[in-house]
Structure formats: C-alpha cells, structure tokens
Amino acid sequence: RYTTKGKTVDPATLKELVTNITLDTILVMDRIEINKIFVLDNIYFEFAKSDITPAAANELNKLVEILKDNPEIKIEMGSHTDSVDTYEYNLLLSQRRAESTVKYLVNNGISQQRLTAKGYGETKPIARNTNPDGSDNPVGRARNRRTEFKIVEIGDVVRPVSEEAEFDEDKYFKGDGN
C-alpha cells in the first residue's frame, strides 16, 4: 500500500491511476525579462510552407495561455530558416512563417498590438548547416528551422489577487480512500 496526504491507495489502483494519466507538457518560462528569447518546441513548417501544423498549433496554444496570463508583455515572434535556397528567399519565407504564427495568436484572442512578426532567414543559426568537411548537416539544419518569441516590452498591469483552488482529492483518488 502507498499513501499520500493521509489517503491509502492499494497497488492495483495506484497502477491504474498512473497508467491512465496522460501528461501534457507545459511551456515553462524563466524569469520574464526584456529581450529574453524563448525557443518554442515543435513549431515546424512543411518545406517551403508557412501554414501552421497541428503540432505547431498545440505549442502555440501554450503560448496563448502564457500571454493571457501575462497581459503586460509584448513579444516578437521570430522565425528562422536553414541555409538551403537563396538568402532573399529564406528571409521572405521566415517572415511569412513569423506572420503566420502572429495571425494564429491573434485568432486565439491575443491583441495584435502586443505582437510583432520578424523573419530572420538564415542570419542567426544556432547550429552548423554544413559539417566542417562541407557535407550537409541535416540535424543542424533542422535545429536552425525554428520559431522563437522574444519579450520586447513589459508594461504595468495590476492583477487581482486570487486564492488558490483547494486540492480536489476525488479528482485523483478513486474509491473510499481505504
């Protein structure tokens, strides 16, 4: 038997509870500071496209919640590409992708005045696009195709103090607690 906060749970029930839980990752931010950059996971685009994929939408939904919880911040959505194709093409493609992410945020309730779209093309790589011997580096190129957000302004917002919700044991424990 296992116990937590005075509740006893038999091993079979505990196993059922643990195996039936689906965990969704949350976007955890460090301290909010101006010019701090946060890389968003799973914001990938199909080759030469700027449409938001379902995986990207899921990640952007997390950002929507952060922005709703922090109405005092304004952000820049920055998109980056690898070095395949021309410099000019990559700059335009990254701008379209950044604008696509901003449009998604606006369509989900975030004010356009809080958002800026910026395409960086291939100008700010975080990994090598080619190996030292000149051969292609697909892993590095994939890392460079990313979307980030940067906090560009922190305004003053007075927030109401809310009490923390009481822990609901029935939500997590089945049966009578024996």
Image: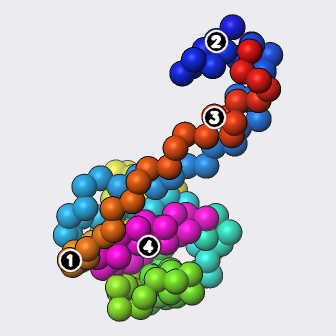
> Vertical placement of 110 versus 176: above or below?
below
Residue 126 drawn in magenta? no
x, y percent for residue 80: 41, 73
Label 3 element class:
helix
Marks 1 and 2, the one that precedes in the sequence: 2
The one nearer the camera, 140 or 150, is 150
Q: Is 151 on the left or on the right of 64, as rendered?
A: left
Residue placed at 35% from the left, 76% from the top?
Answer: 71
Marks 3 and 2, the one that precedes in the sequence: 2
Residue placed at 44% from the left, 73% from the top?
Answer: 68
Residue 76 drawn in magenta? yes
Of circles 4 and 2, which is in front? 2
Label 1 element class:
loop
Which numbered dot is residue 130?
A: none
**Residue located beneath label 3 in the image:** 169
Q: Which quadrant does the N terminus fall into?
A: top right
